[in-house]
Image (spheres, coloured by chain):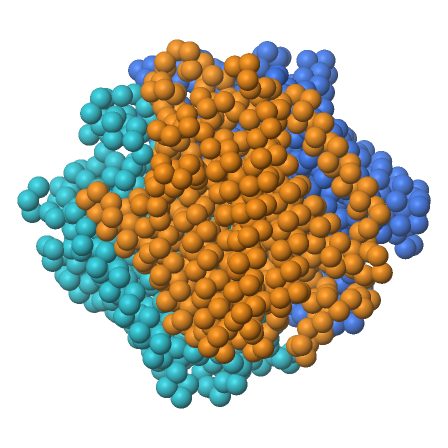
Chain colours: A cyan, B blue, C orange
């Protein structure tokens, strides 16, 4: 395969080391601890409307919940592929670890205090959030990109996210507490744009490694359940402390619960003999968390949150069943994890629900036009940013895997011995079987 | 198999959708956010004896620990079966997601404020608790019931639980902070009564799918360890804030630690060549958390908690070894997960320990007779409620699996391709092997 | 095998039961609940410099994070071996459950109030910490020791730890908030000393069971990621509440993030075709948490923390690649999990960084000489204590496994049927394959 230089020695290590060294230098120049003596009007952590004086560690349990979603949730959700578990959880760790540093810098540069970025729990929650966009996009191109390509995507996607986030929150003054628009819709359409640019005709008819095996589906459920449980923390972490935060928790908790019922029902309705499909269960049960994000801290009523989740579960499951095949066959968008169904459509649904809720006066001081502008901005930055990023990482020297090695850990990882051996001997063990079919 | 209509298309989706729509309507009519202006004397969250004014999110980290126990703990604990992991963790999610909504309504109807149910963290912890009863009973009938049957069980079990809980806590005024009686004993004997009614003579001699494989036992340990770690939160979540809550944490932590030693010791003592048995380790190590539940916030002394845990570990392990086979062969009670050993006997032990502790004056204002009445009430509601529920779900149109398809995901789930294929080809891969033996 | 009496019946159960009974008696004599009326000057929980009055449950979320690291983190990190998962997570649970009780007593005896040990959240965090030393040492001797040997090691290692901890913190007054020296370096060199004494020439050329399989590496990543995420809680749990605690969180979070990049880069740099090695990723990504421990609450600057993590990731990965084989072949130290690379060298690095930081005035009231003495003390107690422990558990009646049964669960556990069967039939299933190669 002369056209593909997938050997990562030198290219990947040099890139990782240089990026980290640059990052450390930027931290040395710009980043200091928050000492609580902030006079930054943008620093919400010290600017609460609540009566109780905030303590520096108040948000820490929330932060840890979000942290678990980023590293266990996203990481294991993607381990459903039979031979791509090392990459799913391992590259997820790599991208998120770099992304949170880059996010601290990019978001920090837009909120400096006397030329310094003051780091506190609120800021590291936002840094985790910024990595979520990359991990969503990662799902769209999973198995078809090299670690080097993904690091480049991380840099670009987080930089563009920070601009859009600043625009939405500070300039437009739109409300998006659970980030349906600025994280989920943005991350999904950014990833889909990248996937479109990287379209592989050779995978038009699928790939033998693209499916799951029994235990890989079980590992993926670890990701699903942790995401499902901690989503109320994701949607409420940066809400106003007190009753607004409680509202965000309750709305998200109920939306997710309702979403489970509709996702299971529709999965059974559309599948062969009324069986449930693991892909739907792993993903569509989470759509309620995405879709209620923008409205999470609004006074939409518990049943309003449930309605949003109920619809999201239906839309997401139908998307997996009917839309994903069409995107792949007709539009050249090969969306490995179906992020369009979990983050894309539910993210837009969340944005629309936010517009309606604000128009109905469910958010004090909200402005429906600004909400609509925020949604449009998020989609615009995503599509343009993703397309540009796709063109850059399509350049032929970033180690992109050839078609036949897609969805295969052994290209970038040392895989345990019995696996390698089986490749040659046509042995009958669990994993080798799948390889033998290639 | 004409006698069995296990095809879930229509039956399951319609039931799930209708249930969720009814639930949303009831929420629209009755449920509102807690705005902190509660004057409900039953609302403990705003009625604390503690000096510090409570904040709406104070209990949130406790809630998340309980949430993890419900969805990861119970879900993965049941994945030990070799071919039933999708159902264990997936149906667990379905039942708990519906159950928490139903529990909010049922418990809420008994504690309304001006005709409304005010939802807050305290209430969603109790909703999670109510689902625990269903998940315990699920363990008794695991692998032998359809999702439709289980949804019906969820509705009935939670409704009856709410009545018994109200009776025990409000009418009898009994103490059961960690719910040894009202959750564990109730859930176990409810499930055993259902299992008795659903007795299958055809499974008298076991079933090929009933065992574990190496990796399914590893998945189950994820459930075990998360339950074990967060049990102090379960037993203290609704304790009086302050030192009573600390006492509940410390007692549970120590009871569980002591229980591990006795469970390991007895497992080795009763097994072939002194080996340890994974079934005992996965379950009996948790009996200390169950048994110390009623006394958790009482002044029983750290060593008292350890004694309870120590005894619970012994009783539970001996139950798995000697009692479960007898229940199955002589009493027609086929208890898949051994919930009698983990929740049943330790729950009764907890109730008895509570009677003794209260009689010894370890709980201010306690009344030993009321404790005994609470235990009797919990067992009575469980056995009668479970028997009635069993009779209802035994009706022949709920899609109950035939004997030969018990403990098998492929009846209700799309199982990854290589598995299906192996059924025919007698392939030698890990999972197919077990199938081939059928 | 007449020289080995590995049958655990009687020996193990009697030891476990007797230990637990003695422990309960000691608790009955010495341990009481903390009632908040402490006048113990050593009780930091009630002696905070912060203005806000501490509540008894303030540290509880931190405790639970540490708890997850001990039971899920350490437990699953060691499941990478293909046939030793039951022991890794199961014996980890056993040792930690006993160790935390023993640690409460040993540390408590050195900090009594009117002849009693007052148990609170601060104390149970420290008890969890004391077990971490044992679990680190466990990694060095994993697969080559019996549960009886390991229980003896637990007793001795925690007792000696408590003495060294008291010496370092109270007598020397050294700073080690994240315990680079007193837990990580101590635990690692204690374990290496034990491993040296238990040197097995028969395993000089490796063992067929010593490697991983695909799914065992996935289970290990659960451990890695939970350790990685919650390490900020480990390093900050006992820091001064307020901004010092925030500093410890931020430093650890950043050190770990930087460490991931350098570990990945070096792994790719030294491996065949630039591939990543799961052993490095599972372990070296955590070295930044170890190495920043001593300095975590010091004013080293965010970039200082990142530098420490960056170097730790490089040192750790190089250690796995080049040093571990040398230790094994030339020094007779067979370090199963490579604890020298994850805890040993990074622990020393942390101690040295602490000396430098204190010398540079980054810690108010610090004394560089005392820091150096603390490091020397920790290493001295570890090496001497480990050697003595090794000699005791080398006595021939503790059930040590013979060479050919090392790294094999089936010696001490009932392993699911298909596994046993395969041993004889040379079947082709996943796990048996590896055995067949033996």
Quadrant where the C terminus of chain C sits is top left
What x and y, as percent, mark residue B218? 50, 33
Q: Quadrant of residue C424?
A: top left
> In the image, C381: left or right of C229?
right
Compared across the picture, whether B251 is left or right of B364 comes to left
Asked if residue B218 is positioned above or below residue A17 in the image, the reply reads: above
Query: Relative to C25, does residue A15 appear above or below in the rendering?
Result: below
Residue C310 appears at what percent x and percent y? 35, 62
**Residue plotted at (35% across, 76% down):** A28
What residue appears at the point 72 percent right and 39 percent down from the top-left corner? B258
Of C408 and B199, the residue lying toward us = C408
**Can the viewer see residue C419?**
yes
Q: Nearer the viewer, residue A260 or A12?
A: A12
- Residue A162 against residue C20 in the figure, above or below: below
Relative image position of residue B355 (x, y in whole percent): 88, 41
Residue at image location 72% in from the left, 66% down from the top: C42
**Which residue is drawn at the image coordinates 59% and 39% (left, top)?**
C389
């Amino acid at each position: 395969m002369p056209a593909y230089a997938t050997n990562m020695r030198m290219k990947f290590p040099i890139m990782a080391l240089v990026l980290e060294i640059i990052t450390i230098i930027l931290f040395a120049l710009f980043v200091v601890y928050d000492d609580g003596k902030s006079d930054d009007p943008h620093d919400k952590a010290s600017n609460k409307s609540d009566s109780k004086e905030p303590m520096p560690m108040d948000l820490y349990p929330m932060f840890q919940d979000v942290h678990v979603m980023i590293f266990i949730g996203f990481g294991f959700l993607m381990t459903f592929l039979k031979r791509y578990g090392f990459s799913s959880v391992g590259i997820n760790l790599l991208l998120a670890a770099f992304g949170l540093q880059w996010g601290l810098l990019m978001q920090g540069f837009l909120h400096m205090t006397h030329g310094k970025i003051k780091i506190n729990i609120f800021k590291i929650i936002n840094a985790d959030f910024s990595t979520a966009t990359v991990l969503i996009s990662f799902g769209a191109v999973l198995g078809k990109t090299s670690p080097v390509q993904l690091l480049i995507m991380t840099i670009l996607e987080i930089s563009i996210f920070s601009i859009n986030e600043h625009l939405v929150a500070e300039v437009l003054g739109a409300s998006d507490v659970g980030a349906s628009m600025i994280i989920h819709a943005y991350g999904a359409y950014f990833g889909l744009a990248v996937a479109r640019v990287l379209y592989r005709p050779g995978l038009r008819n699928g790939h033998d490694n693209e499916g799951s095996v029994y235990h890989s589906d079980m590992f993926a459920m670890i990701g699903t359940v942790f995401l499902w449980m901690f989503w109320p923390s994701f949607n409420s972490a940066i809400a106003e402390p007190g009753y607004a935060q409680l509202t965000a928790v309750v709305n998200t908790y109920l939306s997710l619960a309702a979403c489970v019922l509709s996702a299971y029902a529709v999965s059974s309705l559309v599948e062969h003999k009324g069986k449930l499909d693991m892909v739907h269960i792993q993903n569509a049960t989470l759509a309620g968390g995405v879709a209620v994000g923008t409205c999470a801290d609004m006074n939409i009523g518990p049943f309003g949150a449930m309605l949003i989740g109920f619809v999201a579960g239906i839309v997401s499951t139908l998307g997996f069943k009917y839309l994903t095949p069409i995107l792949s066959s007709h539009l050249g968008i090969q969306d490995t994890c179906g992020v369009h169904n979990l983050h894309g459509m539910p993210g837009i649904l969340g944005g629309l629900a936010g517009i309606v809720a604000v128009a109905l006066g469910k958010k004090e001081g909200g402005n429906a036009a600004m909400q609509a502008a925020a949604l449009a901005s998020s989609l615009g930055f995503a599509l343009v940013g993703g397309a540009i990023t796709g063109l850059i990482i399509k350049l032929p020297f970033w180690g992109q895997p050839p078609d036949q090695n897609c969805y295969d850990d052994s290209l970038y990882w040392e895989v345990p011995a019995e696996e390698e051996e089986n490749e040659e001997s046509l042995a009958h063990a669990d994993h080798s079987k799948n390889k033998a079919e290639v």
